[in-house]
């Protein structure tokens, strides 16, 4: 056995079944072998899919953490994307241990049921309960159960100090069972956008139990507070960018070049960007627009761009490697972002770092990045006429663009530096790990 009677287990020490939380000794021999092992901090990330081309901030965070000597493992609930090898290489995460869903998980589940049957039943009950009012959540929760059971076993074998849920919703199934069966494993959760709007019952319940909630914007705090999470368990840590690395390549501006970076889905309102750009061309006939991203809206948007006003002036680039996205931003004078709901979009940060002034809609949290005289111009959501006026002003006034970007870069360096912000997160994790270890040592005396 590993640890005294009365010591609650962790995934690094003991995560086996227990009759009553915090009262019985650990009884899983796998974890007993790991207990009190002295090694670098071990952090496991649980996410839906890994990596995701449109979530470069997640890849950057995990890469920076691994580069600091932390042992990292990523467990994804869904299968790998078709271009997984190329994408991991482009994002610099090819050396990070990662597992994804496979058809074999269904069969592996049967092998785990003997040792993990109790946890599997509890996860099934919880997923069903959380999905009782929404058919989509019920079906998704049930379909993901085999993978959840496999992930739980993977984590039990690996023994992390910290399990961090990247996004709420379905990763909450893993978080719930870990908090129940391994309460001395530090459990943290990122809540930042879609998962807050979804209000998946599992997100809310696990957020109340987690050791720490991480969010990237002050604007998210009222919503998290309404979930019933105490303020002292919430940390605002910005999703940072590698400012120094971006600055190594100087901008080479193309006159009257405008760029849009977004997934081509309805809520991103790229159609508004096209309408705004059409108005801009009345004053700047030589202006060009490059649209970076892909999605189900692309055919409709391409048809819209075939209008006589825009024909030959709009180019759809699709998904391109991140380094090429940065080069497009370095070449552009203005980035136009017309989303209905983004919370501090990463593309806006990178645009400013590349010397590309931003015209962005007034979505939650954006004023924490862009403000009067800093970074760009904010316009009302849905008001593409105001967007056109702002783009025209920035194309007309190069000195204003330079001023806005210089002030924006200063803000990025102060609040959105990747290395600094990851350092803050690691400190918070280490503090909580040390607290649990201290509590365990005290209980052992």
Image: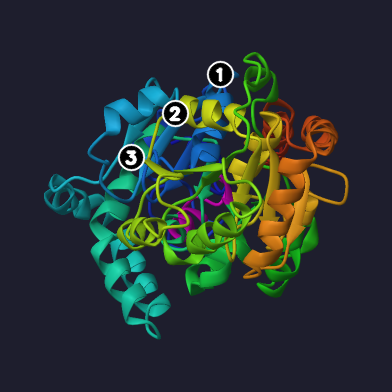
Which numbered marker is on residue 67? 1
Residue 338: image x %, image y %? 59, 59
Q: Residue 340 or 25: which is nearer the viewer?
A: 340
At numbered mark 2, what does the secondary structure look like: helix, strand or loop? Answer: loop
Of mark 3 and mark 1, the one earlier in the sequence is: 1
Q: Where is residue 275 in the image (x, y as percent from the top left)?
A: 54, 62
Left or right of 441, for residue 62: left
Q: Residue drawn at (69%, 25%), measured in percent from left and top? A: 243
Q: What element carries label 1?
A: helix
Q: In which quarter of the image is residue 177?
A: bottom left
Q: Is residue 145 above or below residue 2?
A: below
Kindly report the distance in space between the C-alpha atoms of the residues bearing marks 2 and 1: 24 Å
Circle 3 crowding by C-alpha within 10 Å: few under 14, some 14–19, many from 20: some
Determine whether 197 is above or below 379 in the image: below
Label 2 vs label 1, nearer the camera: 1
Circle 2 or circle 3, nearest the eye: 3
Q: Which residue is drawn at 35% across and 55% down?
A: 302
Residue 168 is situated, as x and y percent measured from the top left of the image, at 51, 59
Check if mark 2's residue and mark 1's residue have beta carbons within 8 Å.
no
Which quadrant would the N terminus be assigned to in this image? Answer: top left
Lower position in the chain sequence, tag 2 or tag 3: 2
Which residue is the site of mark 3? 154
Q: Give the range drawn in magenta.
A: 175-189
């Amino acid at each position: 056995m590993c640890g005294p009677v009365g010591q609650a287990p962790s995934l690094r020490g003991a995560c086996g079944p227990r009759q009553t939380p915090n009262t019985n000794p650990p009884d899983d021999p796998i974890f007993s072998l790991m207990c009190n092992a002295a090694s670098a901090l071990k952090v496991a990330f649980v996410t839906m899919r890994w990596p995701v081309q449109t979530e470069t901030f997640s890849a950057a965070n995990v890469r920076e953490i691994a580069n600091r000597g932390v042992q990292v493992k990523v467990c994804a609930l869904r299968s790998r994307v078709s271009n997984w090898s190329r994408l991991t290489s482009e994002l610099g995460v090819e050396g990070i241990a990662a597992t994804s869903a496979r058809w074999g998980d269904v069969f592996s589940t049967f092998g785990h049921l003997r040792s993990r049957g109790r946890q599997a039943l509890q996860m099934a009950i919880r997923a069903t309960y959380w999905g009782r009012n929404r058919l989509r959540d019920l079906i998704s929760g049930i379909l993901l159960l085999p993978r959840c059971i496999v992930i739980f076993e993977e984590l039990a074998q690996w023994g992390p100090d910290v399990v961090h849920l990247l996004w709420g919703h379905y990763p909450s199934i893993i978080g719930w069972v870990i908090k129940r069966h391994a309460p001395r494993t530090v459990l943290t959760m990122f809540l930042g956008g879609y998962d807050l709007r979804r209000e998946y019952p599992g997100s809310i319940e696990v957020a109340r139990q987690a050791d720490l909630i991480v969010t990237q914007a002050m604007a998210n705090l009222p919503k998290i507070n309404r979930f019933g999470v105490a303020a002292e368990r919430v940390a605002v840590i910005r999703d940072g960018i590698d400012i120094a690395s971006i600055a190594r390549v100087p901008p080479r501006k193309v006159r009257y070049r405008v760029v849009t970076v977004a997934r081509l889905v309805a809520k991103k309102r790229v159609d508004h960007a096209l309408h705004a750009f059409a108005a801009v061309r009345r004053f700047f006939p030589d202006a060009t627009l490059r649209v970076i991203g892909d999605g189900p809206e692309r055919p409709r948007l391409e048809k819209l761009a075939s209008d006589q006003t825009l024909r030959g002036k709009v180019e759809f680039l699709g998904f391109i490697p991140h380094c090429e996205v940065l080069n497009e931003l370095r070449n552009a004078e203005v980035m136009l972002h017309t989303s209905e709901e983004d919370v501090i979009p990463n593309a806006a940060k990178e645009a400013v770092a590349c010397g590309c002034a931003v015209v962005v809609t007034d979505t939650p949290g954006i004023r924490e990045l862009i403000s009067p005289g800093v970074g760009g111009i904010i316009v009302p959501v849905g008001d593409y006429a105001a967007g056109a006026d702002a783009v025209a002003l920035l194309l007309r006034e190069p000195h204003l663009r330079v001023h806005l970007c210089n002030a924006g870069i200063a803000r990025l360096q102060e609040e959105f530096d990747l290395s600094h912000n990851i350092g803050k997160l690691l400190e918070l994790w280490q503090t909580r790990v040390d607290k649990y270890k201290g509590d365990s040592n005290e209980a052992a005396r």
